[in-house]
Amino acid sequence: MTAGEPPAPGRIVVGVSGSAASVAALAWAHDEAKLRGWTLDVVAAWPDLGEPAIHEVPGHYSVARGRAVDGLNAALAACGVELDGPTARIWVLNEDPVAALVGRCDGADLLVLGGAHGGRSRRLGQPTMRELCLGRVRCPVIQVDVPDGGLRSSA
């Protein structure tokens, strides 16, 4: 940025898996980005956390990628996120979800994640996405909590 040039707008990164908690996180992040006039980066990664790595082969259908895209599309539709505007960018990444989020957070102002199950990981005994991302990103991390049974999953 040079003298007299306006500062770049802020940027929010949100992880979307198609779960009810991630839909709630997307809704919150979308509203916050509109309120602040910031850019919204919506990140869906595949395969899911803890699943074996699957690399996309051109010309072949991938169930894991299809599941990620279906969950992403359902979440976008539920939250009314406009895909043709300059304020929302969509990322469907073939990599570990934590690595995908950390990579997109470079220079971001905020990371938003969904939380459910009383703040515990659905994978009993495993850290939550928030815990996995904290300390690996330089921006604040917000967790939008959804009470158990509060929403139905879109995936």
Image: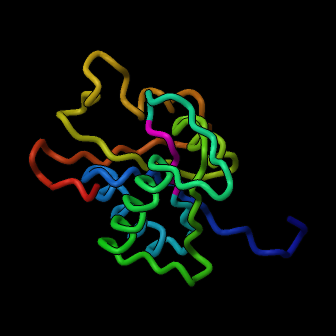
Q: Quadrant of residue 4?
A: bottom right
Total labels: the figure holds: 0
x, y percent for residue 149: 9, 47
The quadrant of the image that shows the C terminus is bottom left
x, y percent for residue 90: 56, 65
Vertical order, 31 against 15 (above or below): below
x, y percent for residue 93: 60, 50
Vertical order, 4 against 142 (above or below): below
- Residue 45 located within the stretch drawn in magenta: yes
x, y percent for residue 21: 27, 49
For the point 19% across and 35% down, which residue is it? 117
- Which residue is farthest right? 2
- Which residue is farthest top? 125
Over which residues does the magenta segment extend? 43-48
The quadrant of the image that shows the N terminus is bottom right
Q: Going by the image, does 148 lie left or right of 130? A: left
- Residue 49 located within the stretch drawn in magenta: no
Q: Going by the image, does 19 lie left or right of 41? A: left
Q: Nearer the viewer, residue 43 or 74?
A: 74
- Which residue is farthest bottom? 84
For the point 37% across and 22% down, which residue is it? 127
